[in-house]
Image (tube, helix red, strand yellow):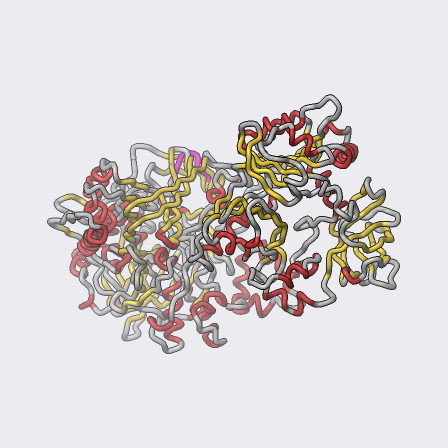
């Protein structure tokens, strides 16, 4: 037998590198471990027992598992590359200089002041928040409660690891690198199939790294190394260790989180988006605890976790170990512990002796065995010190120990299958839920399929490979194993609710402090639905997603309500499988990359003219420093240029979506209030499009380029959204329509020329078509050449002046803008920014979507009732315009406002008739406003109740403490007869 000379570290065994040491700290204490340790195994090796406190009662918590199943071991961790506020210790690889700290317990987890809450624990049953803190108001208690809970606090300093993003596809994805996954992988090797095999541990092998087994004459560890080396030499295989499959979605798309380690910690994390043709789910299973009074004391741990610590890390969690089990997994732990030199004080088996397969081996190792017994209670505070055992004859005996390894059966890790909507199916002989009807091209193998022995797990993997080959038409010859020796877990006899001990001292969920008595209370208060039980008691809502608590909890509820376990149902597991750092999801999308700034094709030309840019997704010139010393001077000069000679505006950000095909006219017309199907080649039309509720979604013009070829121009901010909306309706509502949708916003640059001399400036470009008013009228469209460059020219006005929009391939934008802005002998074309452009459109009374509309505005409110009435065929939102809410006379309608004196401001409230000062009822508000040089006063647009029936009325507008007198007018103040734009 090995001796224990270094704390809880065994002198021999495990896969760690004992020739080297790794220094780290925990709560300020300097400690040492070895390469190959996890943070959990290293802490246990150093005798660290209490690592935190529970959520509600602040009871001491120690390690319960050594992987994703552990509900207790959330720690704050800093390595060389950054800080993480909450990581599970069993999933953190030990590295030099690592610093770990408890995240619960003040001033320390050993002595927690908040543990005094246990004095009133009888008052803190399930649902006590809802019953206690509602009077006088929850908001008085919420800050205190939130401060006292949680697992970790983020640091205020932002630290970035190196992050990567990968997109990939494969023929087969194998989830789990244990014996079943490796068996499937080696059967698929050598036939050209692209395979990705993933395991969340830093090395493949799963239970073979710590169980006693031989395969074809090799130890489990040696067999794993042989297989992994062969797979690594196959160019069609990608082996991803230290990688968690976090989520499964439709179409067999998966999210993978890969951690790349070095001696300093996680230096890189990579988020994979992987799509697979076939999936082998070999994710294994975890031990499920048995319940008994006092079962949450430090030192009580899952049986498989204890066996793994001994076999893989050379660590024992206790010097004097008791085993409590209802299956033979507990015997394997006892034998492994005794072989490693641990004092195994006894095996307590809830079954009869005849059910135990390994009782002879246990007795040969001189381990006392007790049958048909249950643990009734435990003693100890910072560590379990003894257990009370009651036999079926109700005799009680006391057993001294410093640790208890428990195994109440197994929980197959089917979470990823349930992400795809698979319903768990209860299998009575296993006492476990397995994946029911699987998604297409999915196969399960090993523990997740209910295999409780190695030979069956290996067979599952090989059969999955053969099934994939049959489906895909690929020749697969399974690599048969000649001989397998490994102990089985034997028959399981489920024990759910303990027969002895207090329900109020028997814990089901260790992290959230849910007791058997809480489940009983939920049943009494009729929260018998499993989903309601979960939310009422917080059962399974911890960071372990209920891996060790959910099945016990629902089985207890089944017993209380006298239902079968299989009929009570299960809670729904949702992505992610384990927590994902928000930083990883964001990857490099931060700063400018969070929402990448888009630059106009002629950005450099704007910079040369001292443009001041505004960020609206696109970097667009707001005004030009070359036109004035400050913003107001520049904007005034730019407006004057457009009104008196000519201005040039870069409108490249405006949306451009081509719609083509035999049904293009009918398709695009369904999106707009105006009938676009009647457009003939070379004609354009302005309109708005609506959502299904009749509210304006976007506006813009549509040009008919040719027969069955249309060009839609949505607003800059909605260009991508409208294109996606077109595609959504094409795919989901009108899949039979023969249309193609091509967003080409970035392909074309658009430069607008506006002003009385716009035609002269455009003529400089020598277009190969007639520019006369008779040949090229307002709202017409031309394709042709300017110079030798293909161009599209639309005669459309946003300013009220003669205006052309010239579109050329984006790469020609700088040259086009330079030519247009070149100084002539007798006139100087002026660059115009966004602010001047918007004020020019306001003088004309044109709608600016988002400013002059809100979430209620319909086309009836902006003067398009006549167009709606004329439209006889259907369009999106038409029927909603018949609702009383849309046709009511009290709706806010878009009108103009002309101030008699004073400063009109956006957001100003229109006072109701009869009121002269605020506060008072209001009839609407100002949506756009500015001083108009052309009108000589402040003007604006406003949404006012019954506005179109109140033209000519004088109203008072409250603007920042001042009341401004205004006249309601039609929304148009400059050139109401449209003579200038038809020039």
Comparing 257 with 554, the one in front is: 257
Q: Check residue 96 for magenta coloring.
A: yes
Asked if residue 176 can be seen in this view, the reply is no
Q: Quadrant of residue 780?
A: top right
Q: Is residue 765 magenta?
A: no
Q: Main secondary structure of the magenta part?
A: loop
Q: Position of residue 844 (x, y in %)?
A: 75, 46
**In this orientation, which residue lies closer to the viewer: 682 or 164?**
682
- Residue at image coords 29%, 59%: 323
| Residue 393 versus residue 268 in the image, above or below | below
Q: Residue at x 34, y 64 (%)?
A: 424
User: Percent x, y for residue 503?
Assistant: 42, 70
Q: Left or right: 308 with respect to 270? A: left
Residue 467 in picture, x, y percent from top left: 21, 54
Quadrant, the C terminus: top right
Q: Magenta residues, as a range?
A: 94-99
- Taking the view exactly as shown, the residue that stands out farthest to the left is 482
What is the residue that sits farthest to the front in this orientation? 774
Task: Give how far across and how far down residue 491 sits, in percent.
Answer: 22, 65
Q: Quadrant of residue 24?
A: top left
Q: Is residue 385 visible?
A: yes
């Amino acid at each position: 037998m090995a001796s224990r000379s270094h704390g809880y570290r065994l002198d021999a065994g495990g896969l760690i590198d004992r020739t080297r040491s790794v220094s780290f700290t925990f709560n300020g204490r300097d400690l040492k471990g070895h390469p190959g340790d996890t943070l959990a195994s290293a802490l246990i090796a150093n005798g660290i027992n209490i690592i935190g406190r529970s959520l509600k009662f602040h009871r001491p918590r120690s390690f319960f598992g050594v992987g994703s199943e552990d509900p207790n071991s959330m720690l704050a961790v800093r390595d060389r590359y950054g800080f993480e506020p909450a990581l599970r210790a069993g999933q953190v690889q030990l590295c030099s200089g690592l610093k770990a700290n408890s995240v619960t317990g003040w001033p320390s987890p050993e002595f927690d002041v908040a543990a005094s809450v246990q004095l009133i624990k009888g008052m803190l049953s399930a649902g006590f928040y809802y019953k206690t803190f509602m009077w006088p108001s929850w908001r008085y208690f919420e800050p205190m409660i939130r401060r006292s809970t949680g697992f970790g606090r983020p640091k205020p300093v932002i630290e970035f690891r190196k992050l990567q993003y990968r997109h990939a596809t494969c023929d087969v994805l194998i989830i789990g690198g244990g014996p079943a996954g490796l068996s499937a992988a080696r059967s698929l090797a050598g036939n050209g199939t692209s395979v990705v095999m993933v395991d969340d541990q830093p090395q493949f092998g799963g239970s073979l790294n710590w169980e006693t087994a031989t395969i074809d004459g090799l130890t489990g560890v040696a067999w794993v190394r042989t297989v992994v080396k062969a797979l690594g030499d196959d160019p069609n295989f990608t082996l991803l260790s230290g990688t968690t499959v976090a989520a499964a979605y439709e179409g067999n798309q998966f999210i993978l989180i890969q951690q790349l380690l070095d001696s300093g910690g996680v230096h890189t994390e990579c988020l994979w988006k992987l799509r697979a043709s076939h999936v082998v789910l070999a994710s294994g299973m975890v031990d499920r605890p048995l319940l008994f009074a006092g079962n949450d004391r430090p030192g009580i741990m899952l049986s498989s976790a204890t066996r793994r610590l001994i076999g893989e890390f050379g660590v024992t969690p206790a010097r004097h170990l008791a085993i409590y089990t209802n299956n033979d997994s507990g015997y394997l732990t006892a034998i492994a512990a005794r072989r490693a030199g641990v004092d195994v004080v006894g095996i307590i088996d809830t079954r009869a002796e005849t059910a135990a397969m390994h009782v002879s081996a246990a007795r040969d190792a001189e381990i006392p065995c007790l049958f048909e017994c249950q643990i009734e209670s435990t003693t100890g505070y910072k560590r379990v010190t003894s257990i009370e055992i009651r036999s079926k004859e109700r005799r009680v005996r006391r057993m001294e120990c410093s640790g208890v390894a428990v195994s109440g059966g197994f929980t197959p890790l089917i979470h990823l299958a349930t992400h795809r909507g698979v319903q768990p199916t209860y299998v009575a002989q296993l006492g476990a839920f397995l994946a029911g009807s699987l998604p297409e091209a999915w196969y399960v193998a090993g523990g997740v399929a209910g295999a409780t022995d190695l030979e069956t797990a290996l067979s599952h993997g090989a059969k999955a490979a053969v099934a994939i080959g049959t489906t895909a038409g690929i020749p697969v010859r399974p690599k048969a194993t000649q001989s397998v020796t490994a102990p089985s877990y034997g028959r399981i006899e489920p024990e759910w609710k303990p027969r002895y001990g207090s329900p109020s001292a028997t814990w089901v969920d260790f992290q959230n402090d849910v007791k058997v008595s809480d489940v009983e209370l939920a049943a009494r208060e009729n929260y018998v639905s499993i989903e309601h039980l979960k939310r009422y008691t917080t059962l399974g809502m911890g960071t372990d997603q209920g891996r060790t608590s959910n099945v016990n909890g629902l089985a207890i509820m089944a017993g209380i309500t006298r239902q079968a376990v299989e009929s009570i149902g299960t809670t729904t597991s949702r992505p992610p499988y384990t927590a994902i750092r928000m930083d990883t999801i964001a990857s490099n999308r931060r700063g400018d990359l969070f929402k990448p700034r888009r630059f106009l094709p002629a950005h450099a030309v704007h910079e040369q003219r001292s443009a001041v840019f505004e960020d609206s997704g696109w970097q667009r010139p707001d005004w030009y420093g070359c036109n004035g010393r400050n913003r107001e001077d520049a904007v005034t000069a730019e407006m004057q240029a457009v009104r008196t000679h000519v201005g040039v505006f870069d409108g490249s950000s405006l949306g451009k979506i081509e719609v083509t095909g035999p049904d293009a006219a009918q398709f695009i017309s369904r999106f707009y209030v105006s009938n676009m199907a009647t457009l003939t080649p070379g004609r354009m039309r302005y309109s708005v499009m609506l959502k299904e509720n009749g509210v304006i979604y976007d506006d813009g013009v549509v040009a008919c380029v040719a027969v069955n070829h249309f060009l839609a121009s949505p607003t800059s901010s909605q260009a991508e959204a409208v294109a996606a909306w077109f595609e959504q309706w094409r795919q989901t509502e009108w899949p039979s329509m023969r249309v193609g949708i091509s967003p080409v916003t970035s392909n074309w640059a658009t430069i607008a020329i506006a002003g009385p001399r716009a035609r002269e400036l455009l003529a400089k470009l020598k277009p190969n078509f007639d520019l006369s008013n008779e040949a090229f009228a307002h709202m017409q469209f031309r394709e042709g050449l300017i110079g030798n460059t293909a161009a599209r020219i639309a005669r459309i006005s946003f300013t009220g002046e003669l205006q052309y929009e010239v579109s050329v391939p984006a790469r020609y934008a700088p040259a086009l803008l330079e030519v247009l802005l070149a100084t002539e002998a007798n006139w100087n074309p002026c660059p115009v920014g966004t602010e001047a452009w918007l004020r020019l459109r306001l003088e004309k009374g044109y709608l600016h979507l988002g400013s002059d509309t809100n979430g209620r505005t319909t086309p009836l409110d902006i003067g398009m009732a006549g167009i709606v009435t004329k439209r006889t065929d259907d369009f999106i939102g038409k029927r909603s315009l018949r609702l009383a809410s849309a046709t009511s006379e009290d709706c806010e309608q878009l009108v103009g406002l002309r101030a008699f004196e004073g400063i009109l401001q956006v957001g100003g409230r229109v006072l109701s008739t009869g009121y002269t000062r605020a506060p008072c009822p209001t009839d609407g508000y100002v949506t756009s406003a500015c001083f108009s040089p052309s009108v000589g006063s402040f003007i604006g647009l406003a949404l006012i109740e019954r506005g179109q029936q109140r033209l000519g009325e004088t109203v008072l507008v409250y603007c920042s403490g001042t009341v401004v007198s205004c006249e309601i007018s039609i929304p148009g103040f400059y050139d109401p007869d449209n003579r200038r734009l038809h020039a």
